[in-house]
Amino acid sequence: MVEARRASVERNTNETQITLRLDLAPGPIEVDTGVKFFDHMLATLAKHAGLGLVVVAKGDGMDHHHLIEDVGIALGRALHEALGEKRGIARFGSMMIPLDDALVAGSIDLSGRAYLNFAVKFTAEDLGDMKTEMVAEFFRALSDNGRFNLHLVQMSGHVNHHLCEAAFKAFARSFAQAKTITGSDILSTKGVLE
């Protein structure tokens, strides 16, 4: 029997206040960061990764940079904590996600080592109320604090909304594969994933 894999993270700084609850099994999804497009992407991520996710976040109101980055930090820490010693997980996941014109490949290794290859090129500065440059910053904070390797690579596409959503879904579906319990061992010749 697998123990419940959950985590709660609070992050309070001079720039942001974040409360986040995560369940690695499907559950309620409630996201309120005050950045509507980002809320949509986080809800999409949780749905396609098979997560329960509750996020309440407030930022300094400057340009959402600190808020989006700090949510990435909090979510990464929660993912790392909820995975525990990673016994029995598949560890790896890969998925190519099409969304109309866009095609984004995602691959993840829950190795315990942080690395991000973000190769999605946007041609607009904004997606609604979110700066496109913050997409890479979010995933960098997520992978650094989640301690995993993540590759998100644009194969085709030109509509910025589609590229962004395909990237979030490619991460989500890859993570859904990697977190799956497939056995009882730690999938590393080292005997640890840290």
Image (tube, rainbow, N blue to C red):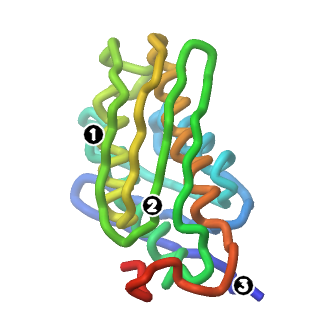
- The x, y position of residue 156, in whole percent, is 47, 18
Distance from the alpha carbon under mark 3 to that under mark 1: 37 Å
The residue pinned by badge 2 equals 109
Give above or below for 41 relative to 110.
above
The residue pinned by badge 3 equals 2
The residue pinned by badge 1 equals 65
Secondary element under disc 2, as helix, strand or loop, is: strand
Binning the other alpha carbons within 10 Å of mark 3 as few (below 14), some (14 to 19) or many (20 upward) gives: few
Of marks 3 and 1, the one in the foreground = 3
Distance from the alpha carbon under mark 2 to that under mark 3: 21 Å
Whichever of callouts 3 and 1 sits on the residue coming sooner in the sequence is 3
Q: Left or right of 159: which side holds 60?
A: left
Residue 31 appears in the picture as rendered: no
Of marks 2 and 1, the one in the foreground = 2
Binning the other alpha carbons within 10 Å of mark 1 as few (below 14), some (14 to 19) or many (20 upward) gives: some
Of marks 2 and 3, the one in the foreground = 2
**Closer to the camera in the image, 21 or 142:** 142
Distance from the alpha carbon under mark 2 to that under mark 1: 27 Å
Q: Are marks 2 and 3 in contact (CB under 8 Å)?
A: no
Q: Which amino acid type is marked by label 3?
A: Val
**Closer to the camera in the image, 183 or 161:** 183
Give above or below for 74 relative to 150.
below
Q: Residue furthest right?
A: 1
- The x, y position of residue 96, in whole percent, is 57, 35
